[in-house]
Amino acid sequence: MHEMSLVAEVIKLVSEDANERGIVKVTSLVVIVGDLSNVLPEAFEMAFFYLRKQSRGVVDKQTELHLIREEAKAKCHACAQEFVPDYRIALCPVCQLPQSELISGETFRVESYEGCDAK
Ligand SMILES: [Zn+2]
Protein backbone atom coordinates (compact mmCIF):
# COMPACT_ATOMS: atom_id res chain seq x y z
CA MET A 1 0.00 0.00 0.00
CA HIS A 2 1.90 3.04 -1.24
CA GLU A 3 -0.54 5.37 0.55
CA MET A 4 1.30 4.66 3.81
CA SER A 5 4.55 6.16 2.54
CA LEU A 6 2.60 8.93 0.85
CA VAL A 7 0.95 9.89 4.13
CA ALA A 8 4.32 9.73 5.92
CA GLU A 9 5.73 12.06 3.27
CA VAL A 10 2.79 14.48 3.56
CA ILE A 11 3.14 14.58 7.35
CA LYS A 12 6.87 15.20 7.01
CA LEU A 13 6.40 18.09 4.57
CA VAL A 14 3.62 19.68 6.62
CA SER A 15 5.70 19.30 9.79
CA GLU A 16 8.69 21.01 8.19
CA ASP A 17 6.53 23.86 6.92
CA ALA A 18 4.73 24.21 10.25
CA ASN A 19 8.01 24.25 12.17
CA GLU A 20 9.24 27.13 10.05
CA ARG A 21 6.09 29.06 10.89
CA GLY A 22 6.26 28.31 14.59
CA ILE A 23 3.22 26.05 14.50
CA VAL A 24 3.50 23.23 17.01
CA LYS A 25 0.24 21.45 16.34
CA VAL A 26 -1.75 20.97 13.17
CA THR A 27 -5.49 20.75 13.82
CA SER A 28 -6.69 20.04 10.29
CA LEU A 29 -5.25 19.17 6.96
CA VAL A 30 -6.83 19.53 3.51
CA VAL A 31 -5.58 17.27 0.73
CA ILE A 32 -6.80 17.19 -2.86
CA VAL A 33 -6.93 13.75 -4.44
CA GLY A 34 -7.72 13.46 -8.12
CA ASP A 35 -9.67 10.47 -9.39
CA LEU A 36 -6.76 9.66 -11.73
CA SER A 37 -3.97 10.40 -9.26
CA ASN A 38 -3.30 6.73 -8.40
CA VAL A 39 -4.11 7.50 -4.78
CA LEU A 40 -7.01 5.65 -3.20
CA PRO A 41 -8.80 8.09 -0.88
CA GLU A 42 -9.99 5.31 1.45
CA ALA A 43 -6.49 3.85 1.73
CA PHE A 44 -5.01 7.31 2.22
CA GLU A 45 -7.47 8.00 5.04
CA MET A 46 -6.75 4.67 6.70
CA ALA A 47 -3.02 5.27 6.52
CA PHE A 48 -3.49 8.75 7.94
CA PHE A 49 -5.57 7.50 10.87
CA TYR A 50 -2.95 4.87 11.55
CA LEU A 51 0.01 7.27 11.43
CA ARG A 52 -1.60 10.14 13.33
CA LYS A 53 -1.97 7.84 16.37
CA GLN A 54 1.82 7.81 16.57
CA SER A 55 1.90 11.61 16.95
CA ARG A 56 4.38 12.29 14.19
CA GLY A 57 5.76 15.79 14.10
CA VAL A 58 2.96 18.33 14.40
CA VAL A 59 0.28 15.78 13.57
CA ASP A 60 -1.37 13.91 16.40
CA LYS A 61 -4.50 11.86 16.96
CA GLN A 62 -6.69 14.97 17.02
CA THR A 63 -5.60 16.19 13.61
CA GLU A 64 -8.51 16.11 11.17
CA LEU A 65 -8.08 15.10 7.58
CA HIS A 66 -10.28 16.57 4.85
CA LEU A 67 -9.96 14.92 1.49
CA ILE A 68 -11.27 16.78 -1.52
CA ARG A 69 -11.95 14.59 -4.52
CA GLU A 70 -11.09 16.06 -7.88
CA GLU A 71 -13.19 14.61 -10.66
CA ALA A 72 -11.48 13.40 -13.79
CA LYS A 73 -12.29 15.64 -16.73
CA ALA A 74 -11.12 15.62 -20.32
CA LYS A 75 -11.59 17.99 -23.22
CA CYS A 76 -11.81 16.95 -26.85
CA HIS A 77 -9.45 18.77 -29.21
CA ALA A 78 -11.73 18.23 -32.18
CA CYS A 79 -15.07 19.48 -30.85
CA ALA A 80 -14.15 21.05 -27.48
CA GLN A 81 -16.59 18.80 -25.65
CA GLU A 82 -15.77 18.27 -21.99
CA PHE A 83 -16.48 14.86 -20.50
CA VAL A 84 -15.59 12.45 -17.72
CA PRO A 85 -13.08 9.93 -19.05
CA ASP A 86 -12.87 6.37 -17.78
CA TYR A 87 -9.17 6.18 -18.41
CA ARG A 88 -6.28 8.45 -19.24
CA ILE A 89 -6.91 7.91 -22.93
CA ALA A 90 -10.59 8.34 -23.60
CA LEU A 91 -12.79 8.62 -26.64
CA CYS A 92 -14.82 11.78 -27.00
CA PRO A 93 -18.50 10.86 -26.55
CA VAL A 94 -19.50 13.24 -29.36
CA CYS A 95 -17.02 12.60 -32.16
CA GLN A 96 -15.51 9.30 -30.87
CA LEU A 97 -11.97 10.49 -31.48
CA PRO A 98 -9.16 9.74 -29.03
CA GLN A 99 -7.95 13.33 -29.26
CA SER A 100 -8.76 14.42 -25.79
CA GLU A 101 -6.61 16.01 -23.18
CA LEU A 102 -6.99 15.53 -19.44
CA ILE A 103 -7.79 18.83 -17.79
CA SER A 104 -8.30 17.61 -14.24
CA GLY A 105 -8.15 14.51 -12.08
CA GLU A 106 -4.40 13.98 -11.74
CA THR A 107 -3.92 16.31 -8.81
CA PHE A 108 -2.46 15.13 -5.56
CA ARG A 109 -1.42 17.88 -3.22
CA VAL A 110 -1.75 19.39 0.23
CA GLU A 111 -4.14 22.27 -0.30
CA SER A 112 -3.87 23.83 3.14
CA TYR A 113 -3.60 23.14 6.83
CA GLU A 114 -4.54 24.85 10.03
CA GLY A 115 -2.61 24.82 13.21
CA CYS A 116 -1.89 26.61 16.41
CA ASP A 117 1.34 27.75 18.03
CA ALA A 118 0.71 26.34 21.49
CA LYS A 119 -0.24 22.84 22.58
ZN1 LIG B 1 -15.10 15.51 -29.75
Image: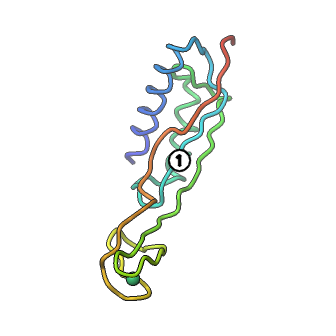
Q: Residue at x 42, y 69 (%)?
A: 74
Q: Tell me which corner region of the image, top left, top right, bottom left or bottom right, holds residue 61.
A: top right
- Whether 112 is drawn above or below 16: the answer is below
Q: Is residue 90 left or right of residue 45?
A: left
Residue labelled 1 has its Cβ within 8 Å of some atom of ligand 1: no
> Where is residue 90 shown, x and y percent of the image?
36, 76
Judging from the image, the colouring scheme is rainbow
User: How packed is label 1: few (under 14 Cα within 10 Å), some, or many (20 or more)?
Assistant: many
Q: Is residue 87 left or right of residue 40?
A: left
Q: Is residue 48 left or right of residue 105?
A: right
- Whether 17 is drawn above or below 119: the answer is below
Which quarter of the rendered image does ligand 1 occupy? bottom left
All told, the count of numbered labels is 1
In the foreground, 20 or 24: 20
Residue lying furthest bottom: 95
> Where is residue 93 shown, x and y percent of the image?
43, 85
Please name the amino acid that badge 1 sits on.
Answer: Ile
Name the residue carrying label 1.
32
In the foreground, 80 or 26: 80
Q: Residue at x 32, y 84 (%)?
A: 97
- Whether 93 is drawn above or below 39: the answer is below
> Where is residue 88 shown, x and y percent of the image?
34, 68
Secondary structure, mark 1, is strand
Q: Residue at x 50, y 13 (%)?
A: 20
Of the 4 image quadrants, the one containing the C terminus is: top right
> Where is residue 47 shown, x and y percent of the image?
50, 41
